[in-house]
Image: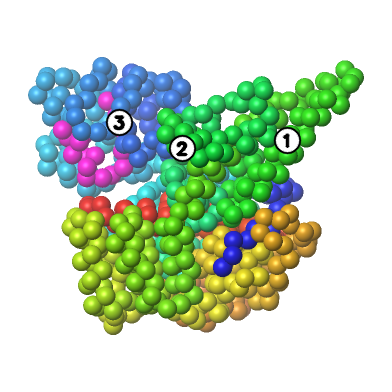
């Protein structure tokens, strides 16, 4: 499966701003809730912060605002004594056992040292009986005032919002804790209160159905006088809920988009990535765009970059237009795009030599600030690519991709498992090995008992017996199973061979340039194909068009965008969607709060619109940057429809594996 360029129109669509769902409202809401929580404690205060909340809070507020509302000093919530100089101490944390025990230790230590403090615990996003029980068992519950900071959706981009809850998948499907489902329902309810009822709720998956039912129940309990709470939305046409358990293949694969690969190889947290400090320094006056693009091209230069002191940087399209152009491209064509940007900027700079008159000079000076900003961005992304590119050329990386592609094609699965065994012998990163092994188990389905036993023994002997609980957890989730499948595993079996044909999950060599499959160089994410079944039916029903360009070539003139059709549910794909595990639902909501299962008559409730509407796609259990890219590509092919992508958190295969390795 080749790496080909997507036909993405990077220009901003001409959309009436009044028709756009402004996610900035959610940021202001989160900021207001935080200010109210801080103001509930009078006087100077010390803020003790759960480290996992640093990224999310950084997206909704800034240190200056915290200081304006009385925060004197801030500390991480971590083991060891807490030296606070203020009477008031505010703890801000997720409702986790480890944090509750640390807080109890602080309180007992202060009591022992005769320090007098007033303690307030703000639990995110809501109070927890587990936290109260631990504090009670530790004998400090009476010393702490417990409240909550109702942090819900956080805008990562103008079309991407997240609860930034990293453990949702593990808690729901392994621990049996459905708190994340409830918190998701509350966040979606807030969206309805702001923009009106979702006219239609569609989805796939058992827990997605639970979320839908809970959302409806919470909606029925909301006060009727609340603005927008019982009227249909004029901006949002539907809510599509995807249960992560429905598609476990996609997150196990290596992401091949620019942003996806940066996340895979360097790690991104709440849109932030740690970069060498020199990449963030402003270019010198003598440094032209072409010089910036050519900087550090030697092996020594790349090594120097990787050894430099790192600095956290927020990668966002809001203030980096070059990143907006690059983020969703297949990484194989990013270099060619950077080269085109460098040549364009170089030409812009050279135009100063043609400026002879004062007005011409004034015009160039007016453009200079923008050119310098673009040059800085070009330097940053060129350097970033120089860090990522060598890692994509390693033997292990390419062998892993080869195994993935062969498994997706169901080509000699036994040989692929043997290749995975070879990777174990080489001591390759355990997360890479387990991702491939789980993928093999899903597509086979199951692994022969003797082979499974040998592989398990080799993994434990190579990486350590502390990985035994992780192997057991993967087996409990039926991500790692043996043949024959148990009844529970059989009920989760994914008929990949049939779905490859009915939903065109795999595309041939000349069919990847006009399809979402470009994000995995030939594999279309099942989750996004499900969205296409509802929101872009023509993409699946029409025969794929052949590709006319080489990878990295400038795209030819594109056909005009097609007008998006109204949302009419699963019509035309009912049998396909019902053929694999997970409840299927399609509900039309009424202004009075009622709802009916979709039928031919119910379809008429939603009339076609000439305005631009937004379809909210919510991933329960997390989504990858490649799925985000695929949905953006879909939106770029249609007139009249935007996607607002919502998720419990951004995930990747390695983060799933690492999370399943942690104990309660």
**Dots 2, 1 in contact, CB < 8 A:** no
Secondary structure beneath label 2: helix
Instruction: Give the residue number, with chain letter if any, for mark 3.
Output: 76
Q: Quadrant of residue 339?
A: top right
Disc 1 on helix, strand or loop?
A: helix
Question: Is tag 2's residue or tag 3's residue first in the polypeptide sequence?
Answer: 3
**Mark 3 and mark 2 in contact (Cβ < 8 Å)?**
no
Q: Give the alpha-carbon distance from disc 2 to disc 1, as whole Å.
A: 27 Å
Q: Which residue is mark 2?
A: 303
Q: Which residue was labeled with disc 1?
A: 345
**Mark toward the viewer: 2 or 3:** 2
Instruction: Please tell me whether residue 576 is drawn above or below residue 67 in the rendered image.
Output: below
* Quadrant including the N terminus: bottom right
Q: Indicate whether residue 90 is drawn in magenta.
A: yes
Going from N to C along the chain, the mark reached first, 2 or 1, is 2
Q: How is the image coloured?
A: rainbow
**Mark 1: few/some/many CA within 10 Å (<14, 14-19, 20+):** many
Can residue 596 be seen in the rendering of this structure? no
Q: Is residue 583 magenta?
A: no
Dot in front, 1 or 3? 1
Q: Which mark is residue 100?
A: none
Q: Give the side of residue 558 with respect to residue 488, left or right.
A: right
Residue at 68 percent across and 35 percent down: it is 290
Considering only order in the chain, which callout, 3 or 1, is on the residue closer to the N terminus?
Answer: 3
Q: Who's the residue at 59% across and 34% down the image?
A: 295
Tags 1 and 3 in contact by the CB under 8 Å rule? no
CA neighbours of label 2 inside 10 A, class few (<14), some (14 to 19), many (20+): few
* Vertical comparison of 11 with 635: above or below: above
Q: Secondary structure at mark 3?
A: strand
The residue range painted magenta reads 89-105
């Amino acid at each position: 499966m080749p790496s080909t360029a997507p036909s993405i129109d990077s220009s901003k669509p001409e959309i009436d701003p009044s028709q756009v769902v402004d996610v900035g409202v959610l940021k202001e809401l989160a900021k207001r809730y935080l200010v109210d929580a801080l103001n509930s404690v009078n006087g100077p205060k010390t803020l003790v912060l759960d480290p996992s909340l640093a990224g999310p809070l950084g997206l909704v507020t800034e240190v200056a605002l915290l200081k304006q509302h009385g925060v004197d000093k801030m500390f991480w919530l971590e083991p060891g004594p807490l030296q606070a100089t203020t009477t008031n101490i505010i703890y801000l944390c997720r409702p986790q056992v480890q944090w509750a025990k640390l807080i109890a230790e602080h309180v007992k230590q202060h009591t022992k040292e005769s320090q007098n403090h007033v303690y307030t615990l703000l639990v995110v996003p809501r109070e927890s009986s587990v936290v109260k029980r631990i504090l009670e068992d530790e004998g400090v519950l009476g010393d702490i005032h417990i409240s909550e900071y109702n942090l819900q959706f956080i805008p990562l981009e103008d079309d991407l919002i997240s609860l930034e809850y990293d453990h949702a998948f593990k808690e729901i499907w392994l621990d049996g804790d459905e708190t994340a489902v409830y918190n998701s329902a509350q966040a979606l309810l807030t969206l309805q209160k702001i923009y009106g009822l979702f006219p239609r709720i569609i989805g796939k998956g058992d827990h997605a159905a639970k979320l839908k039912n809970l959302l409806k129940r919470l909606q029925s309990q909301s006060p009727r006088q609340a603005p927008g709470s019982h009227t249909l939305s004029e901006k949002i046409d539907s809510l599509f809920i995807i249960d992560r358990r429905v598609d476990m293949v996609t997150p196990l694969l290596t992401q091949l988009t620019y942003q996806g690969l940066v996340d895979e190889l360097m790690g991104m947290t709440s849109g932030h990535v740690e970069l060498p400090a020199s990449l963030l320094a402003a270019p010198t006056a003598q440094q032209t765009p072409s010089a910036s693009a050519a900087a550090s091209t030697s092996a020594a230069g790349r090594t120097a970059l990787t050894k430099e002191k790192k600095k956290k940087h927020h990668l966002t399209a809001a203030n980096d237009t070059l990143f907006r152009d690059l983020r969703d491209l297949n990484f194989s064509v990013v270099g060619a795009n950077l080269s085109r940007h460098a040549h364009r900027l170089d030409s812009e700079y050279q135009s100063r030599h043609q400026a002879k008159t004062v007005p011409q000079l004034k015009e160039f000076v007016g453009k200079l600030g923008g050119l310098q900003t673009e040059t800085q961005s070009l330097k940053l992304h060129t350097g970033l690519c120089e860090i990522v590119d060598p890692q994509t050329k390693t033997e292990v990386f390419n062998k892993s991709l080869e195994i993935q592609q062969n498994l997706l094609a169901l080509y000699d699965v036994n040989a692929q498992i043997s290749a995975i065994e070879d990777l174990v012998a080489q001591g390759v990163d355990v997360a890479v090995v387990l991702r491939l092994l789980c993928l093999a188990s899903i597509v086979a389905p199951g692994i022969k008992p003797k082979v499974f036993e040998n592989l398990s023994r080799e993994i434990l002997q190579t990486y350590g017996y502390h990985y035994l609980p992780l192997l057991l957890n993967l087996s409990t989730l039926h991500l790692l199973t043996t043949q024959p499948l148990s009844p529970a595993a059989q009920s989760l079996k994914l008929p990949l061979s049939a779905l490859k044909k009915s939903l065109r999950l795999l595309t041939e060599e000349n069919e990847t340039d006009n399809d979402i499959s470009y994000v995995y160089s030939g594999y279309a994410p099942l989750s996004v194909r499900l969205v296409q079944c509802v929101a872009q039916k023509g993409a699946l029903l029409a025969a794929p068009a052949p590709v006319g360009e080489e990878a990295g070539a400038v795209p030819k003139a594109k056909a005009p965008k097609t007008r998006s059709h109204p949302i009419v549910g699963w019509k035309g794909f009912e049998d396909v969607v019902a053929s694999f595990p997970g409840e299927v639902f399609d509900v039309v909501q009424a202004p009075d709060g009622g709802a009916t299962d979709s039928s031919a008559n119910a379809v008429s409730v939603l009339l076609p619109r000439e305005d631009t509407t937004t379809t909210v796609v919510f991933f329960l259990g997390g989504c990858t940057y490649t799925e985000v890219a695929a949905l953006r590509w879909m939106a770029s092919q249609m007139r009249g429809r935007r996607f607002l992508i919502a998720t419990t958190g951004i995930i990747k295969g390695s983060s799933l594996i690492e999370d399943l390795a942690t104990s309660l």
